[in-house]
Structures are given as C-alpha cells and as structure tokens.
Amino acid sequence: LIIVSIVTLVFMCLLAVPLADQIRNPVLMFSKRSTSASDDSTATQTDLPAPYRELESTGRVLTHEISRRRAFQSAYKRTFEVSSRGMARVCPDSLIITDMNERIRQIFELGPQKPPQTTLYDIIVGDAEKGLGGFSDALRQDKEFNIEAEFFTASKNRIWLRMSVILIR
C-alpha cells in the first residue's frame, strides 16, 4: 500500500502536474489577453510564451470584434446625441426609458438631467396604452413598431407623436 502511494505520488509529480501546466498556461494566457483587450489595456505580446495557434487566432478575432463593436457603439452614441429627431432608449421588457437625446428632452419639456424612472405607460395618454402591447413582441421578433399616440409632457401638456421603434444590437 505504501509502495502504491509512492508510485502515485511520483507519477503525479513527474507526469501529471507538468502535463496539466502545459495545457493550463496557454489557456490562462488567452484569458488574460482577452480580458485586457476588452478592458482597453495594452497587453504585451512577450509577457508569456505564445499559446496554441487556435487560441492565438481566436484571440485576434476577439480583439478585432471588440474594436469593431466599440467603433459601432461610438458612432451610434454620436448619432443618438446629435440627431435632430427625438430619440430615447427604452428597455423592451419593462418599457422603462433609460436615456433621451436633447431633442426629445425639449419635446417632453425636460432638463438635461438623467430621465426619471419613467415608463412609456407613465407618459402615454389613456387608451393609447393598449397600442403599446405589441412593443416588446415586435422587438423580440426584430420587427419595426410604429404608433401614433398622445403623450404627456413634464408640465402635463398633451402632445401627439409618432413613435417608431427599432431594435439596435
């Protein structure tokens, strides 16, 4: 029994642990590079030995896709902020308004502060609420949603607006 334990210990020390390290190290390096790419930090290419070719290729693709997504988000943010049309971000499930551009703030007579925790149901007038029923379903199906409805402004005035909703990923 003691001999079996010693043989197992020797096997673990001589073969299993180094083999596990050879598998683990490239995966850890890939994880580190992926994290640093998504955090905008600059990863040095010489800090660890090169991982498996598949992981290196996947890391390059991941880094490229992250930079493309950031460029898209930046362009969308600029478009959102300077659009002459009123634009708002609305959570498709709860219909909570999470952000508004300057033009829609003017339309709803709001200041530059973050919008209050308001849903579309809070600002839409009466029977028009029924028209919002297809909002979430249309977005889940990646379809455009349009409604003409009367809305309340911050000063409780009523205004008619045509709302067009699209899902932006």
Image: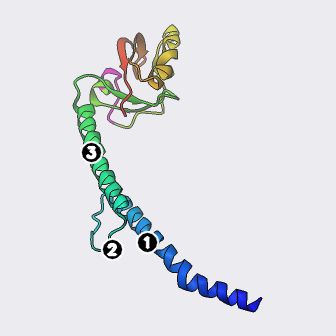
* Quadrant location, the N terminus: bottom right
Residue 83 shown left or right of residue 111 in the figure: left
Looking at the image, do the residues carrying marks 3 and 1 touch, with CB atoms under 8 Å apart? no
In the image, is residue 107 part of the stretch drawn in magenta?
yes
The residues tagged by marks 2 and 3 sit, at their Cα atoms, a distance apart of: 27 Å
Tell me which segment is drawn in magenta.
Answer: 106-112
Where residue 41 appears, x then y in whole percent?
Answer: 30, 62
* Quadrant location, the C terminus: top left
Q: Main secondary structure of the magenta part?
A: loop
Residue type beneath disc 2: Pro
Residue type beneath disc 3: Arg
**Callout in the foreground (2, 3):** 2
4 is higher (above) or lower (below) than 67: below
In the image, is residue 164 part of the stretch drawn in magenta?
no
Residue type beneath disc 1: Asn
Disc on the earlier residue, 2 or 1: 1
Residue shown at the point (48%, 10%) measured from the top left: 128
Q: What kind of colouring is applied to the model shown? A: rainbow
Where residue 88 appears, x then y in whole percent?
Answer: 36, 28
Tell me which corner region of the image, top left, top right, bottom left or bottom right, holds residue 75. Answer: top left
Element type at mark 2: loop
- The mark found on residue 68 in the picture is 3
Disc on the earlier residue, 2 or 3: 2
Residue shown at the point (37%, 16%) measured from the top left: 163
- Crowd tier of the residue under label 3, counting other residues whose Cα lies within 10 Å: few below 14, some 14–19, many 20 or above: few
Element type at mark 1: helix
Looking at the image, do the residues carrying marks 2 and 1 touch, with CB atoms under 8 Å apart? yes
144 is higher (above) or lower (below) than 80: above
Looking at the image, do the residues carrying marks 2 and 3 touch, with CB atoms under 8 Å apart? no
In depth, the one of 112 and 2 nearer the eye is 2
Q: Which residue is mark 2?
A: 49
- The mark found on residue 25 in the picture is 1
